Image (spheres, helix red, strand yellow):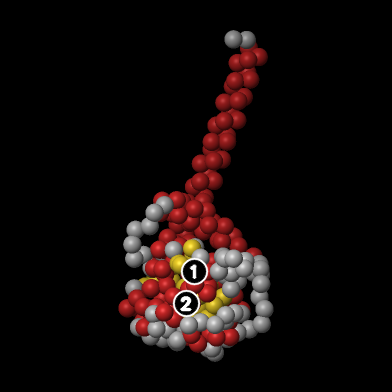
Amino acid sequence: MTDKTKLRLKNLLKIFIILAIIGIAAIGAALGISEYVKRSVSDRLLSPEAAAELSDIDCIIVLGCRVNGETPSPMLSDRLLRGIELYDLEAAPKLLMSGDHGRTNYDEVNAMKQFAIDRGVPSEDVFMDHAGFSTYETMYRAKEVFAAKRVIIVTQSYHLYRAVYIAQKLGLDAYGVSSDLQTYIRQDYYNLREVLARDKDFVKVIFKPEPTYLGEVIPISGSGDLTNDKEFT
């Protein structure tokens, strides 16, 4: 091996070591931010019974998830069941179903509202946020469009920390109740992805960009039928 080749290999090794150190530092920072988000709101994650003891809650926000046609996925069904349970416990007088209805052939929120109506919740007590395209946009719009101030958020545990953290940073007085009613497939994947999502939204709430849509105010204290775009049976 020539001296020139040895020098080249030595330089490549140095570059590899530097990149490895940078990578380890980046992973450490990502995990650190994720853990900070979790710890900062852990005292605001409550049982359904404890949440029902809160006062002056404007609404229960149920976060959207995948639907198959008009049928909620298992993860979304559990969120809806927990939200309805809290409504029945009189934790709040209104439900806010927030999800993706940005396409004519894909509609989370109408499926969510129909699910609640089928289980005895009056239509006027169920609001729909058709432009809840992300957790961040849901919380921004809950405050600015639906004029909510004090809320209970329902989603799975892995997601709940970030949802409550975002809500708090955007000015909502927020609490969370987990909807983990079963074991979900691909949970390890969701947990890993959530670390990156917490990091992203940790930065996002610093700058507070406006969501995709805002629009006129529809107070959560009024009738949820104002958000209807079809008739419910």
Toward which corner of the image does residue 137 lie, by quadrant?
bottom right
Question: In the picture shown, does residue 141 fall above or below 1?
Answer: below
Q: Which disc is residue 114 wearing? A: 2
Q: Residue furthest bottom?
A: 222
Instruction: Residue 224: give x, y in percent of width and height.
Output: 53, 85
Marks 1 and 2, how far apart in space? 9 Å
Q: Amino acid at mark 2?
A: Gln
Q: Mark 1, residues whose alpha carbon is within 10 Å: few (<14), some, or many (≥20)?
A: some
Q: Is residue 115 visible?
A: yes
At horizontal 66% and vertical 72% (from top left) the residue drawn is 213
Q: Earlier in the sequence, mark 1 or mark 2?
A: 1
Rendering quarter of residue 143: bottom right
Residue 173 x %, y %: 49, 78
The disc label shown at residue 97, or none: none
Look at the image and tell me in which quarter the N terminus lies.
top right
Q: Are dots 1 and 2 in contact, CB under 8 Å?
A: yes
Which x, y percent locates residue 139?
Answer: 55, 72
Q: Which residue ends up furthest to the front in the rendered image?
A: 233
- Please name whichever residue, 127 or 212, is drawn nearer the observer in this view of the structure: 127
Q: Nearer the viewer, residue 193 or 39?
A: 193
Q: Where is mark 1, residue-wise?
A: 70
Judged from this view, the residue extending furthest toward the top is: 1
Q: From the viewer's perspective, is 228 left or right of 216?
A: left
Give the structural element (helix, strand or loop) at label 2: helix
Q: Residues within 10 Å of mark 2 (few under 14, many from 20)?
A: some
What residue sits 48% from the left and 82% below the top?
A: 233
Q: Report the amino acid beneath label 1.
A: Glu
